[in-house]
Image (cartoon, rainbow, N blue to C red):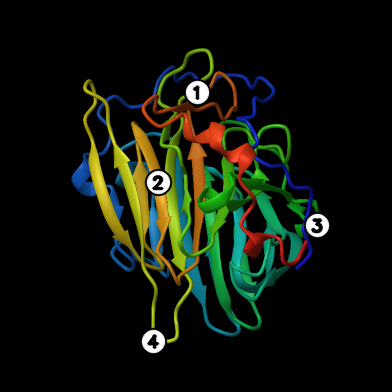
Amino acid sequence: MKRGAARRGAAPIDAAVLPPDGATSAAPGAAPAAGLHRRAGSTATGGWSVVVTPETAGWQYAGLRVADLAPGGRIAFSFDEEAIVLPLAGSASVTCDGQRAKLAGRPDVFSGPTDFAYLPPGASVVIESRGGGRFAVATARAKGGLPFRAGVAEDVSLELRGAGSCSREIRNYAMPGGFEARRLLVVEAVTPGGNWSSYPPHKHDEERPGESILEELYYFEIAPGPAGPGIGYQRAYGTAARPLDLLAEVVSGDVVLIPHGWHGPSMAVPGYDMYYLNVMAGPGPERAWRITDDPAHAWIRDTWPALAIDPRLLRDR
């Protein structure tokens, strides 16, 4: 598969300043831990196999929908949020207020990055797929979105993050300093079986130097093994002031919500590669991804320079 520029152990990225939307902080009464793991199929409605909105998540900004389309299938919608259409499997055409973009897509999420399309808030949109497929629509509440446009797979910035058993590939679709949006941030991660990602555990729930407030969700797909579907695990935990405690077994189609607190690791069990799509959004005043590592585990980063990148991530480079 064709790869873009890779950076090892990249640091958090700051972004250009965006005008605030009038909100100053994330929702203090975010979703309780019991509702953080949404199992595959449990949120399906209205032709979507996954539906997470700010209202159902218990927060203010980030959301996700996934549509599974049969050959020749289509789905029409109009959201108040800005959005990115991301083919998970298959190709599609996306029509937005009469303008059309063709997305060549990919066979599956383990086959490298894909092209994608940005949708402004309030647009009338139709996704159509001649061959069928699965399509994610990542959303964020934002005022005054940007024009409809497409991004190409070859321009997606890739990082080889971590090293050794922490090696993973990060695909930056809509991150600060790259593809522009008002509030929405979208990345993918692929973690080879037996490795850990989203590690060391980190958080982004305070607006302060070195950290920004971002709601985040994880959508998972796990590569199957010879005997059937694979599994993985996701950990999240809170602070003394804002407790949260989650350790979830995840399968393809599951979603985990991170309203606040430390999150990681995402554990790809031996034999089963793990994919997840991260959708993030927050109140600003910048569209920025800044994180704070859990001080108990931050030292892990210092071990990476002495370790090799997992060779499974280097095969096609």
List the residue tagged with mark 1: 212
Q: CA distance from mark 2 to mark 4?
A: 26 Å
Q: Name the residue located 75 percent from the left edge and 62 percent from the top edge.
A: 100
Q: Nearer the viewer, mark 4 or mark 3?
A: 4
List the residue tagged with mark 3: 154
Q: Name the residue located 38 percent from the left edge and 66 percent from the top edge.
A: 46
* Mark 2–mark 1 CB contact (< 8 Å): no
Quadrant placement of the C terminus: bottom right
Q: In the image, is 58 to the left or to the right of 207? A: left
Q: Residue 263 placed where, x, y %?
A: 38, 39
List the residue tagged with mark 4: 227
Q: Is residue 234 above or below residue 121?
A: below
Q: Earlier in the sequence, mark 2 or mark 1?
A: 1
Q: Name the residue located 57 percent from the left edge and 52 percent from the top edge.
A: 168
Q: Amino acid at mark 3?
A: Glu
Q: Nearer the viewer, mark 4 or mark 1?
A: 4
Quadrant placement of the N terminus: bottom right
Q: Nearer the viewer, mark 2 or mark 1?
A: 2
Helix, strand or loop under label 4? loop
Please tell me which residue lies in front, 7 or 173. Answer: 7
Bin the neighbour count of mark 3 within 10 Å (Cα to Cα): few under 14, some 14-19, many 20 and up: some
Q: Amino acid at mark 1?
A: Ser
Q: Earlier in the sequence, mark 3 or mark 2?
A: 3
